Amino acid sequence: MKNAPTLHRFEYLAFLCFMLTVRIVPHSAARSIGRLLGRILFTFSRSRRKLTLSNLAHAFPDQSLDKRRRVARRSFAEMACSFTDAVSSARFDAVEICGRLELDGWEHLEQAEREGKGTIILGAHIGVWEIISQVVALYKGPVSIVGRPLDNPFLDRFVAHNRSRFGNILAGKRGAARAMLRALKAGGRTAILIDQRVQPKEGIPIPFFGRPASTSPIVARLSLKTGAPVVPVYAFAASNGRYRIKVHPPIFPDGSGNDPVRTLTCRYMDGLERVIRKDPAQWLWMHNRWK
């Protein structure tokens, strides 16, 4: 809720108490706190639980209700774990983060970087996505990150500091295309989450789990305009407080066909759907993606 200073201060105070609690315990134990929080939210957040189960029913109509409920419960736990992980990992310096990584497919990012046309890092609300831009910044250099500021300005300052502490540059949703274009023309890199719902006037309907979902065409348009390859990157929690960074092969722009923007965007969403299907609980099903 915007323009609610009293509520924002209360939320921030609660967040500080939560952060202090998380920082007391080891990083691996902090994830357990997140999973407990997720189970509590699943129990008491009736509207989000209902939306999650509805989305899963549309995406996996052949699954039993019991199985969809198990996926939904795990999804709540994983998303809360992702939040707790971001709070806990903010204590780490560059050396500590790099020591906790398992890099899978990093050669694909190297391949894209060798093109010299800039690189678009494509992510989604799956796994522990907040760590991705930090890892890329540490190994390759600054990333221009596109994201909407939080309504709570106090919490937004924490998130902005965490995302930019290794040199990354934050670009708000307004003017994002210009910021991304500047980074790519300079041979740099930019990052955006592809699975956010956008207004119909700003997006194009792209099939996603069998239903049209309004999706931003900005990634495809920038890739076609600059020649920058798009590299899907996802991060997942591994054992003992570690991270598994999965880098997929680059998707190079192809201007052929009647509607290359739509064709490329479909490729991005098809790839994301395949990743989600491998472990559906890792994705944010409580988001009204198909509204």
Image (cartoon, rainbow, N blue to C red):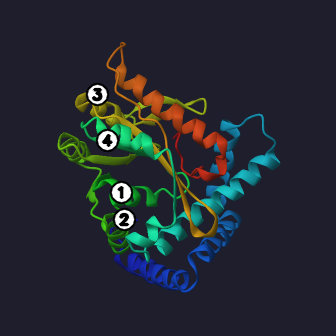
- Which residue is more in the foreground, 103 or 165? 103
- Which of pointers 2 and 3 lies earlier in the amino acid sequence? 2
Q: Where is mark 2, residue-wise?
A: 151
Q: CA distance from mark 1 to mark 4?
A: 12 Å
Looking at the image, is mark 4 or mark 3 nearer the viewer?
Answer: 4
- Which of pointers 1 and 2 lies earlier in the amino acid sequence? 1
Q: Amino acid at mark 2?
A: Asp
- Which of pointers 4 and 2 lies earlier in the amino acid sequence? 4
Q: Residues within 10 Å of mark 2 (few under 14, many from 20)?
A: few
In percent of width and height, residue 52 lies at: 64, 50
SS of the residue under disc 4: helix
Q: Where is mark 3, residue-wise?
A: 224
Q: Residues within 10 Å of mark 3 (few under 14, many from 20)?
A: some
Q: CA distance from mark 4 to mark 3?
A: 16 Å
- Which of pointers 1 and 4 lies earlier in the amino acid sequence? 4
SS of the residue under disc 2: loop
Q: Amino acid at mark 3?
A: Leu
Q: Amino acid at mark 4?
A: Glu
The mark found on residue 113 in the picture is 4
Decide if residue 65 is in sight here: yes
- Which of pointers 3 and 1 lies earlier in the amino acid sequence? 1
Q: CA distance from mark 2 to mark 3?
A: 33 Å
Looking at the image, is mark 4 or mark 2 nearer the viewer?
Answer: 4
Residue in view at x 27 percent, y 30 percent: 227
Q: CA distance from mark 3 to mark 1?
A: 26 Å
The mark found on residue 139 in the picture is 1
Looking at the image, is mark 1 or mark 2 nearer the viewer?
Answer: 1
